[in-house]
């Protein structure tokens, strides 16, 4: 029963993680207030303005979202007496069914009304009046070293309005934030996010937001200062969101600024968005931004702080240093496009316990149900729902239900019992039998226990040829408790092979859907995939998915748009590459179709090609948004069912969206390797053992691995062709030619379509035999040229193969030049 023990420990750990899910990380030291200090008085004045916030996190997976114990919590500060609360955006960003608890223990339903991820601030509204609004301080009055108290909800929601005391350790800090932060050594633990940092005058000087928690790091927490809080609150009230100015440039800090040294340099312009205010003002890549108005900018935080003083539409002067001089540019600021931050109330309106009133649980698709104890937690569920694992919230037992995805046929009682008998070793076996019930479900039963893993029971049921296996594992101590075993048996006995959809007390955990799956990547790209498509297991520069027989696939590629690049220029390059690859008779290309996707222009283009047998099509959608190029491609046989293809393509295109909020904030410049490729560039391949080297075209493949290859057979491929060099230091030139002559004549004799010509030539200063073959394999015509020669006591056989479909002048010349680049060493 060793595997039962490992499964048990795995489940215990997973539950511990999900139950303790909060919105922040870390721990730290706290300071006891000196007797006679002002701390107790200050806390009594301000604590009523601090609330605890709890709700259900979204986006954590189908299983977690259905777990009533999967909760997240944080803290908030009342800023208006009618129930307006400010908190961190990361506390409520992915939270629904929000519940707010005030310091006097009153509970309110809450909803997020405004959110600004860049500043990490959000507003939550509750329906209440007469609340105690906090007194907000001025950031300019903060002094390093002054005593402060952090009020929040650390670790557990039961620890609401906890207080830790420390000092202001620093101000205007630039760490992990768009704006400056206050540094404090007052403990800011998980759950304190969004809480108040107050001074000894009872004023809130900051909103607690984060803490460093690496090994050896102590008392290093940070809060958002009031000047930023008031800036965001003012914009929320006036505009419903934070209206940020847009210049259209990407900036890089100096090395000194990155490592924290004082910097005399400005910010390097790394990228300029086409048609942006910066581009229209003539700002160039590699210019150095020195100041905005009268404010010097030496870091990204300086830059963001400076822009807080302006609104979209304002005119502003920028001082820049170019390669030759310092210049001033005047421009009109645009506006950063962002989603409306106003949010509505939860549609579920079911309170924080979404399972209230549910006494049974089951799966409507697979047709089973059972009792639903209050402490039963769903910890794991397969994508199609045929397997689900539960654990008791107190860690007392572990339960798994596994259902055959498809019916396999009815089994006899002995066959059903044998099917689960392999699950349990004979050691510790207590019971093995088939339980036949006249008025209930019959099932195969296996019962065992061990000192290490505890009590285990497996039951197997069947209905309409489908097997349902129910496995339960309980703790060692519980295996000796008669009352506990009776309770667990009662739970198992409640299992039924039916699901009553009309029973409102029955919770449905089915995740089965006949709709497609939604895919989202780190670049914010989201789209719908056909159901049952799988992700490619082999390496890819992007992401790709395929159907069951690999005949159709969808791939995504995201790279950065180079400065000044446009959608049309990008697609024109793609079209030219396609035309350069195939001869006209072997390719077709549609006219580019204009689309609007995710509020930007996009182009759709279909390429079709053949090597002479079957035609294959590729429909690609191109768009550029937020400095990234997005390419989504759908590959399929050209002669595939047009209705099916149009359905997949229509669903794919209509589902494409790009959400900036979903982007990984650490994303940088992702080079499009196609933009760097030089078709004339080559890489040197050296074969020391067989004393030759070659210049291999860079566009053929990544030839870095060739440097270490001393095989007698070197193979270099490209789309529709290859170059192969076979070296032999044992076989003579005459024997090699004799064998090749025999092979060519045999091939020609067996197939009249096989045509070859043999001639004597000179290559690399040596007598050589040359064969030119024209043939068609599986309706794919090709040309193959072979050279056999001997140099430095080594016989070489070079094969130059190219399919007729790609035998453009450029491709054939490149292949011949690669062979002709061969050089030899005598040693």
Image (cartoon, helix red, strand yellow):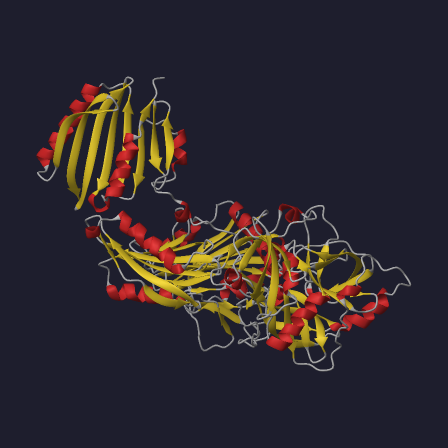
Along the horizontal axis of the image, is 705 left or right of 484? left
Q: Where is residue 631 shown, x and y percent of the image?
A: 39, 57
Along the horizontal axis of the image, is 619 left or right of 172? left
**Hey, which quadrant is residue 642 in on the image?**
bottom left
Q: Nearer the viewer, residue 210 or 283?
A: 283
Q: How many marks?
A: 0
Residue placed furthest toward the bottom: 129
Q: Where is residue 442 shown, x and y percent of the image?
A: 42, 63
Residue 525 appears in the rendering: yes
Asked if 517 appears above or below 538 in the picture, the reply is below
Point out the image quarter for the C terminus. top left
Along the horizontal axis of the image, is 771 left or right of 814? left
Asked if 238 appears above or below 13 in the picture, the reply is below
Q: Residue at x 40, y 34 (%)?
A: 705
Residue placed furthest toward the right: 36
Q: Where is residue 505 shown, x and y percent of the image?
A: 52, 75
Q: Where is residue 637 shown, x and y percent of the image?
A: 25, 56
Q: Nearer the viewer, residue 612 or 530?
A: 612
Residue 722 appears in the rendering: no
Q: Nearer the viewer, residue 440 or 644?
A: 644
Q: Nearer the viewer, residue 415 or 45?
A: 45
Asked if 690 appears above or below 656 in the picture, the reply is above
Asked if 9 appears above or below 467 in the picture, the reply is above
Along the horizontal axis of the image, is 477 left or right of 496? right
Q: Residue at x 50, y 77 (%)?
A: 504
């Amino acid at each position: 029963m060793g595997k039962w023990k490992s499964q048990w420990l795995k489940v215990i750990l997973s539950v511990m993680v999900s139950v303790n899910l909060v919105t922040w990380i870390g721990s730290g030291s706290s300071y006891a207030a000196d007797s006679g200090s002002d701390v107790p008085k200050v806390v009594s004045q301000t604590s009523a303005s601090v609330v605890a916030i709890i709700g259900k996190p979204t986006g954590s997976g189908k299983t977690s979202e259905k777990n009533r114990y999967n909760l997240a919590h944080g803290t908030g500060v009342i800023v208006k007496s009618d129930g307006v609360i400010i908190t961190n955006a990361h506390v409520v960003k992915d939270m629904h069914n929000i519940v707010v608890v005030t310091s006097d223990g009153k509970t309110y339903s809450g909803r997020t009304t405004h959110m600004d991820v860049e500043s990490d601030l959000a507003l939550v509204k509750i329906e209440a009046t007469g609340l105690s609004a906090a007194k907000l301080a001025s950031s300019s009055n903060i002094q390093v070293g002054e005593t402060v108290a952090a009020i929040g909800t650390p670790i557990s929601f039961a620890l609401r309005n906890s207080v830790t005391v420390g000092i202001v350790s620093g101000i205007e800090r630039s760490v992990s934030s768009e704006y400056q932060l206050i540094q404090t050594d007052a403990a800011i633990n998980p759950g304190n996010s969004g809480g108040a940092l107050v001074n000894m005058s009872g004023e809130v000087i900051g909103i607690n937001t984060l803490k460093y928690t690496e090994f050896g790091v102590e008392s290093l927490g940070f809060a958002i200062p009031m000047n930023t809080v008031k800036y965001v609150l003012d914009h929320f009230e006036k505009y419903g969101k934070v209206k940020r100015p847009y210049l259209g440039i990407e900036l890089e800090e100096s090395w000194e600024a990155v490592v924290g040294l004082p910097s005399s340099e400005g910010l390097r312009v790394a990228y300029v968005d086409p048609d942006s205010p910066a581009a229209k003002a003539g700002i160039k890549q590699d210019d150095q931004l020195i100041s905005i108005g009268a404010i010097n900018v030496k870091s990204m935080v300086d830059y963001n702080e400076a822009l807080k003083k302006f609104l979209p539409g304002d005119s502003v002067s920028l001082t820049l240093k170019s390669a030759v001089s310092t210049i001033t540019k005047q421009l009109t600021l645009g506006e950063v496009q962002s989603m409306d931050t106003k949010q509505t109330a939860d549609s579920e309106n079911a309170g924080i316990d979404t399972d209230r009133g549910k006494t049974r649980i089951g799966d409507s698709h697979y047709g089973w149900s059972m009792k639903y104890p209050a402490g039963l937690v769903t910890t794991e569920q397969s994508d199609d729902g045929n397997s689900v694992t539960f654990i008791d919230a107190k860690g007392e037992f572990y339960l798994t239900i596994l259902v055959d995805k498809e019916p396999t046929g009815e089994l006899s009682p002995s066959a059903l019992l044998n099917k689960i008998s392999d699950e349990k070793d004979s050691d510790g076996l207590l019971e093995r039998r088939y339980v036949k019930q006249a008025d209930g479900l019959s099932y195969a039963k296996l019962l065992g226990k061990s000192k290490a893993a505890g009590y285990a029971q497996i039951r197997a049921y069947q209905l309409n040829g489908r097997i349902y296996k129910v496995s339960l594992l309980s703790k060692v101590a519980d295996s000796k408790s008669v009352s506990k075993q009776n309770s667990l048996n009662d739970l198992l006995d409640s299992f039924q092979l039916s699901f009553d959809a009309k029973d409102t007390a029955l919770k449905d955990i089915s995740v089965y859907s006949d709709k497609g799956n939604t895919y989202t990547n780190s670049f914010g790209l989201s789209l719908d995939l056909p159901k049952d498509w799988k992700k490619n297991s082999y390496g890819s520069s992007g992401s790709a998915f395929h159907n069951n027989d690999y005949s159709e696939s969808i791939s995504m590629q995201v790279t950065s748009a180079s400065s000044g690049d446009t959608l049309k220029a990008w697609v024109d390059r793609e079209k030219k590459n396609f035309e350069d690859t195939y001869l006209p008779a072997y390719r077709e290309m549609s006219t580019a179709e204009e689309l609007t996707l995710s509020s930007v222009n996009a182009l759709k283009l279909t390429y079709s090609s053949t090597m002479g047998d079957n035609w294959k099509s590729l429909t690609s959608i191109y768009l550029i948004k937020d400095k990234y190029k997005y390419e989504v491609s759908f590959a399929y046989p050209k002669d595939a069912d047009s209705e099916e293809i149009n359905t997949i393509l229509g669903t794919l295109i209509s589902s494409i969206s790009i959400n900036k909020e979903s982007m990984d904030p650490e994303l940088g410049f992702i080079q499009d390797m196609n933009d760097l490729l030089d078709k004339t560039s080559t890489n040197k391949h050296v074969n020391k053992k067989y004393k030759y080297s070659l210049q291999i075209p860079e566009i053929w493949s990544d030839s870095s691995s060739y440097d270490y290859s001393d095989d007698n057979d070197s193979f270099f491929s490209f789309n529709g062709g290859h170059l192969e060099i076979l070296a032999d230091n044992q076989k003579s030139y005459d024997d090699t030619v004799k064998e090749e002559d025999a092979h060519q004549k045999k091939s020609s004799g067996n197939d009249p379509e096989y045509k070859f010509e043999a001639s004597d030539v000179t290559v690399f200063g040596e007598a050589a035999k040359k064969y030119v073959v024209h043939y068609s394999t599986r309706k794919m015509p090709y040309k193959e040229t072979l050279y056999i020669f001997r140099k430095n006591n080594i016989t070489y056989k070079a094969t130059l193969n190219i399919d007729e479909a790609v035998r453009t002048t450029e491709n054939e010349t490149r292949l011949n030049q690669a062979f002709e680049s061969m050089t030899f060493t005598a040693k």
